[in-house]
Amino acid sequence: MNYKIENKKSAIDGKGSFALERIPSGKKIGNLGGEIISLKEARKRASQTKRVAMVEFGDGRALDASINPNELRYINHSCSPNTYMRVCYSRVEFYALRIIKKGEELTCNYGPTHHDGKLKCSCGSPNCKGYL
């Protein structure tokens, strides 16, 4: 983890990840913690839980961030995010899209999800698409 992050109640959904210090634009925040598993196992686990913390690598494997997680596990979705996710080299990295102020919640546009547009979005952004 390159910056101090804390998890606490989020206005978006459940828990969130919040910056404990200013994060400059373009800087790497850290790598998502978790267990690397097969895509088959990931989809099985995802079907058995409401709050999914899974990132697919595109090579038959996925990262399950509900096992051995870190503070980045609680980055909530936003249609107007302040971070982006980079998936490479068997890692899931988060970077700041802009300056993130101390105390601000970290958010990321999840992109396509297993919800297939059926989960209502609660990001509160003026540009909210309405669903994940």
Image (cartoon, rainbow, N blue to C red):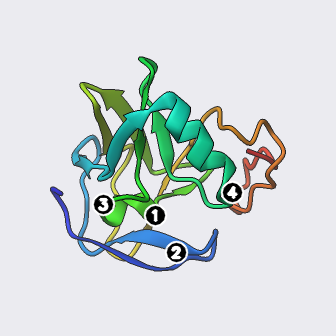
User: Residue 101: which quarter of the image?
Assistant: bottom left
- Is 26 drawn above or below residue 130 in the view shown? above
- Is 77 drawn above or below residue 18 in the view shown? above
User: Residue 122: which quarter of the image?
Assistant: bottom right
User: Mark 1 and mark 2: span between their CA atoms?
Assistant: 6 Å
Q: Looking at the image, which residue is at 37% across and 48% down?
A: 98
- Classify mark 1: residues with Cα within 10 Å, few (<14), some (14-19) or many (20+): many
User: Mark 1 and mark 3: span between their CA atoms?
Assistant: 13 Å
Amino acid type of disc 3?
A: Asn
Amino acid type of disc 4?
A: Ser
> Residue 5 at what x, y percent from top left?
28, 70
Amino acid type of disc 1?
A: Tyr
Q: Looking at the image, which residue is at 81% across and 39% down?
A: 117
- Mark 3 or 4: in front is 3
Q: Is residue 43 left or right of residue 92?
A: right
Q: If you read the primary sequence from the N terminus, does the residue marked by circle 2 or circle 3 appear first?
A: 2
Amino acid type of disc 2?
A: Lys
Q: What is the secondary structure assignment of the residue under circle 2?
A: strand
Q: If you read the primary sequence from the N terminus, does the residue marked by circle 1 or circle 4 appear first?
A: 1
Q: Looking at the image, which residue is at 62% across and 60% down?
A: 51
User: Mark 2 and mark 3: span between their CA atoms?
Assistant: 17 Å
Quarter the C terminus occupies = top right
> Residue 71 at what x, y percent from top left?
33, 66
- Mark 2 or 4: in front is 2
Task: Name the one closer to the observer, 11 or 54.
Answer: 54
Which numbered marker is on residue 68? Answer: 3
Query: Pointer 1: what residue?
Result: 74
Q: Is residue 78 left or right of residue 16?
A: right
- Mark 1 or 4: in front is 1
Q: If you read the primary sequence from the N terminus, does the residue marked by circle 3 or circle 4 appear first?
A: 3
Residue sitting farthest toward the top: 59
